[in-house]
Amino acid sequence: MILLVNGASAVVGRRFSQTLLEGGDTVRCLARQLSKLTDFANPDCEVEEGNISDLRSLQRALISSEVVNLTIDTLSQQHSNGLQRGGGEALARRCASSNSPGGNPCP
């Protein structure tokens, strides 16, 4: 099972990812800046560059992810890029359900 964690280079996402890895889980870390994750050398960790507000990078990250953890700074216009509170969760649910085999592309 692959667990997707967005914001993996930020404080909460990083700690959450590390805890999952220490527990033996396979984690896909989505981060805007890969350079901040160079210390994530773990065979059970996939690091992917992307941003929750970029639909294409979210689609790529969701492929074969079975569990998604979303951490979005909804108070910062810079990070949320206009997402309304809860909008990222709804977007991820739509994308995840459409990424099942034979599903439609994420809207």
Image (cartoon, rainbow, N blue to C red):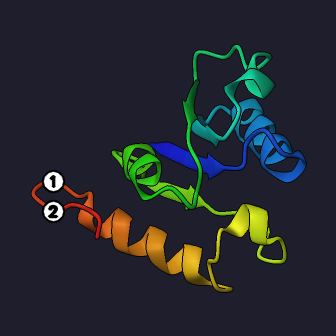
Please determine whether, in this image, residue 12 is positioned above or below residue 48.
below
Residue 72 visible in the picture: no
Q: Which amino acid does label 2 sit on?
A: Gly
Identify which amino acid the numbered label 1 is placed on: Pro
Residue 75 at x, y = what percent?
A: 84, 77
* Image coordinates for residue 61, horizontal then vertical, percent: 45, 45
User: Which residue is drawn at the image coordinates 86% and 52% (left, top)?
Assistant: 12
Using the numbered discs, state the Cα–Cα distance from disc 2 to disc 1 in whole angstroms. Answer: 5 Å
Position of residue 32 in the picture relative to residue 99 (left or right): right
**Secondary structure state at the residue bearing disc 1:** loop
Q: Residue at x 73, y 42 (%)?
A: 8
Q: Is residue 104 visible?
A: yes
Which residue is label 1 attached to?
101
Instruction: Tell which residue pokes out farthest to the bottom in this image.
Output: 85
- Residue 104 located left or right of residue 48: left
Q: Which of 65 and 86 is in front in this view?
A: 86
Decide which of 7, 81 is in the foreground and name it.
Answer: 81
Q: In which quarter of the image is residue 81?
A: bottom right
Circle 2: element type: loop
* Quarter of the picture holding the N terminus: top left
Residue at the image position 80 percent from the left and 27 percent from the top: 36
Check the image and report above or below for 90 versus 64.
Answer: below
- Left or right: where does residue 53 sit relative to residue 99? right
Q: Is residue 65 above or below residue 38?
A: below
- Tell me the tag on residue 103: 2
Residue at far left of view: 102
Q: Position of residue 17 (x, y in %)?
A: 73, 41
Residues at marks 2 and 1 touching, judged by CB atoms closer than 8 Å: yes
Q: Quadrant of the C terminus?
A: bottom left
